[in-house]
Amino acid sequence: MPPLPPKSLHQHVAHLWNWRRGTHPRTRRSIHRDVITIGQLSRYLNDQIGRPPENEELVEAFCGIVEAHEGSIIVDDYAYGLLKVYEHVGSLPVESMRNALSVVYRGATENQVLLARAMFSGLRGSPEKGTLVDGDVVMIVHMLSRTGNSAEALEVAEDFSAKLTSLESERVVWEKVLEGFSSEGNEEVLLRTWEKLEKSKMEMDPKLCAPLVALYCEKGELDSAKMWYQRVVESGTGPTASAYVEIIKACLSTRNYAWGSEIVDTLLGEGGKLHMGKEAWDVVLRWYLALGADPEKMDELLDMMAQRAEEVEVLPSPEMATINGLLRSGMVVVGPSFPFEDFLLIADRRGFNYDRTSFELKLEHKINQGNTEEALATYEDLKTESIPRRYHATEVKHLLRHLCAQPTLDREAIQTIYADLLDWDVRLDVGTLCPLLHILLEGCSFKEVINLLTRESPSNHEKSRIIAQMISHISSSGTSIEAAWDTYQILYQVFPETTVHQRTTLMSLFFDLGRSDMGVMVFQHMRQTRKRKPLKYTYRAALLGVAINRDLEALRVIHNALKLDCQFDPDTRLLNSLMTAYAACGMPTRTMEIWEDIRRSVQGPDHESVAIALDACSRIPKGIRQAQVLWGQLRAAGYQFTAGDYAAYVEALGRNGKWDEGWRIAKEMKGEGVEPDVRL
């Protein structure tokens, strides 16, 4: 066994002061004082506030909380609090530790497991002789095997199974260990453990084969499963009902109808030998559905189920929940073509009343069939049932998505269903919210869009999908500029999480649409945010957008912002964009001033800078001389001209009527090893 949990665990339990939360209703009043006592310990241990209660008080609080949860499972927060008490006090009454183990061993959280380990360790280490009893070992092995700690459960079983006073306890312990390795899919250790048991003096129980059958059924290795099943059969006692269930499930998934039919017949033929629970009957009904059984056959099986329930009171009788399970299985096995109404008539013949689940299943079936009219009628039936608090409304949300996807929209029905969901306090998942949002955006119902987005309060993950959808709508060719701008305004106000990249995309879109005023506004919105400031590529995109629109006023706004931005120093690529914008706005002289800044910079000009400068020179009155000087300077400096550079210079010469010189420069290209391009 591992040592006790370290005292360095850093989990606060100060919220145990809020003693009403997570407490069993009948114990709220009785454990109020106990929880406050543990809360005081928590504040002392975690925050060094105050003094810890006396050990006697802590032991009393421990025993009180455990006693109050008798017959139930203690919640995770209390499990941690009790663990801290045990660590602080150091020892507890034996019966209190045993009782604590009994209220925690069926749990599965980390703190519940830690408390169970601590209690078992305390019991086994108690100085009192005979402290550890069979039930203690059974409980800890049961918990460890269920929570992925089968190797640890095996250690306990090896240490204590031979000391157990009851043969039944020993069998249960080993059964739980084997079940744990089976559920973890650990075939090697499972087989090794089973073989070790077989060689021991312990009388083998057929139940011990069930985990092996379950393992191979889960893996789909039916030949191996069949081998272990035969060993159980040959023992003369027969498998358990759970083993039959696992085999039938595996036969369904692998479509092994031959062996599966044999198993089902054997299971049903066992009669009084096996007590078939709800899970066993559900899988048998699903089996016959897979074989294409009709409602009459299902009626026969339900008669058999009812007869066995009369013979043994603890067995389940057919009820509406049974029919609902049958309908659900039929929808899964058969699909949209499942004759839902024919099987629903089984409930009518037996006098069962439909419930909310029945209508939910019917609603789902009609949606899957694409029968919108009957789906809406079924929805009206569903609303006559009592709607519980925290209703999941899975099928209703599916209906809403279905209506939003129809070519002809029934806006009234969509609005009604959404209003019902609001009345039921149902929050829309992103998969439902997005189709509804799409409908509202398409209809330019922007007030409703704002209400929808603010009311639903989507999570961060959901926000990313919604933002992407709104950007897609803005970018759609079918969206008018006005609608695109209104949608952007909502996006800007409701979702400050919109990234710089996404905002830059929208800014460029408005520039491309010829609305530089909108593009500049998006840019300004970025500047006004704290965490979404424009980056270098944002400035480049804005300047190129300004160039497309030849908007000098917008250019001044962007350039002034760049001068004031202390995030970075402009590099050559950014200054090239600024040159392009000034040249496009008819200010070639300003362009050449920026060229001089680039030329004096550490990074220096690139080929794009040269081409822009040559073009700007040609647009200045008598500037061709400046272009010729620049060309000569670059050549003297050993600059390697590209086809783009030649094209820009020849264009500048041609624009100023110097055709002969332009022709001469063009002919020189090949001598310099540069191939002419289409532009030249």
Image (spheres, grey):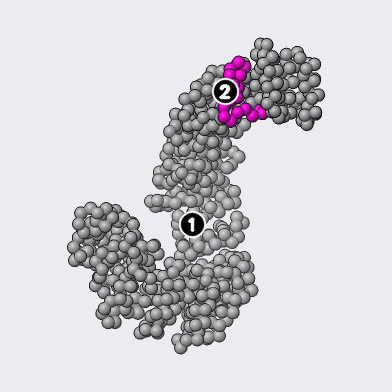
Q: Tag 1's secondary structure? A: helix
* Vertical relation: 445 (above or below) 113: above
* Vertical relation: 71 (above or below) 172: above
**Quadrant position of the N terminus in the picture:** bottom left
Q: Which residues are magenta?
A: 587-608
10 Å crowding of disc 2: few (<14), some (14-19), many (20+): some
Residue at figure coordinates x 49%, y 61% from the top left = 324
- Mark 1 vs mark 2, foreground winner is 2
The kind of residue tagged 2 is Asp
* Vertical relation: 43 (above or below) 470: below
Quarter of the rendering containing residue 474? top right
Mark-to-mark CA distance, 1 and 2: 77 Å
Residue denoted by label 1: 358
Q: Which mark is residue 597?
A: 2
x and y, in percent, of residue 264 in the image: 57, 74
Q: Look at the image and tell me whether residue 639 can be seen.
A: yes
Q: Is residue 145 left or right of residue 668?
A: left
x and y, in percent, of residue 381 in the image: 47, 50
Q: Is residue 93 left or right of residue 640?
A: left
**Quadrant position of the C terminus in the picture:** top right
- Type of secondary structure dominating the magenta stretch: helix
Residue at figure coordinates x 49%, y 37% from the top left = 498
Judging depth in this view, the residue of 7 and 434 nearest the camera is: 7
x and y, in percent, of residue 676 in the image: 78, 28
Magenta includes 384? no
The kind of residue tagged 1 is Ser
Quarter of the rendering containing residue 477? top right
